Image (tube, grey):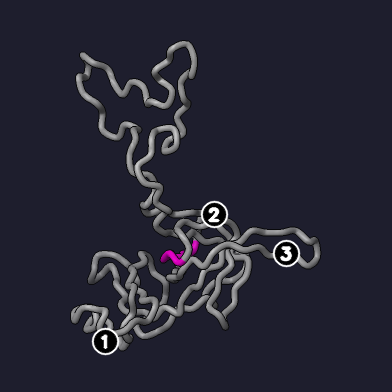
Amino acid sequence: MKGILGRKIGMSQVFDPDTGVMTAVTVIEAGPCPVVQVKVAETDGYDAVQLAFEPVAERKLTKAEVGHLQKAGVGPHRHLVEIRGHIGVSVGETVTVEAFEPGERVKVSGISVGKGFQGTIKRHGFTRGPVSHGSHNIRKPGSVGASATPSRVFKGQKMAGQMGNKRVTQVGLTIVDRDPEQNLLLVKGAVPGHKNALVVVRGDSR
């Protein structure tokens, strides 16, 4: 299992020098991420690795956070994320983009762009009603349940509400290229989140 933290820079495109085929890619500034803690199933109940990302001034962290990082010999960092699985690193090491190879399959997790309060047509893809002959059901959701039985609305019913702004994982992506000097990963396709959003890149073993 591989993993690294990064920041979504934006989208670009690369061209194959032989065929001239254009590929849309997302540029991610990933790492370097020092390893802060390694958890194992024998003592912690599960396998995981804590990675730090983005150095920051010490005054912007709590004393508990600073002490936790200092215990691992790591300076103050803004983000501390735990990645499940055995990555095969130890405390004090640093994970960089060199851990990934071009052509490798990955999955990227992040917070999707928030769309605010939206109706069922935009949020769930409902079909609108007729717009003529006195119809009052143009963009309304319609019936959400029976009246007598069960005399209530089931939980999880698709309705209007907050759209986006939740954790999303995009699977089946591919590493197109990497730039160790600038800590950049080029991932084929789009990944969740707005520009400068924090993302987690992990190996996809599917």
Name the front one of labels 1 and 3. Answer: 3
Name the front one of labels 1 and 2. Answer: 1
Check the image and name the residue furthest to the right: 18
From the viewer's perspective, is residue 152 above or below residue 159?
above
* Predominant SS along the magenta part: strand
Q: From which residue to which does the magenta span run? A: 196-203
Label drawn at residue 15: 3
Question: What residue sits 50% from the left and 54% below the top?
Answer: 171
- Give the mark nearer the N terminus: 1 vs 2: 1
How many residues crowd mark 1 within 10 Å: few (<14), some (14–19), many (20+)? few
Q: Is residue 82 located in the magenta-colored stretch of the structure?
A: no
Residue matched to label 1: 70
Kind of residue sitting beneath label 3: Phe
Residue matched to label 2: 172
> Where is residue 5, by image quadrant?
bottom left
From the viewer's perspective, is residue 77 above or below residue 109?
below
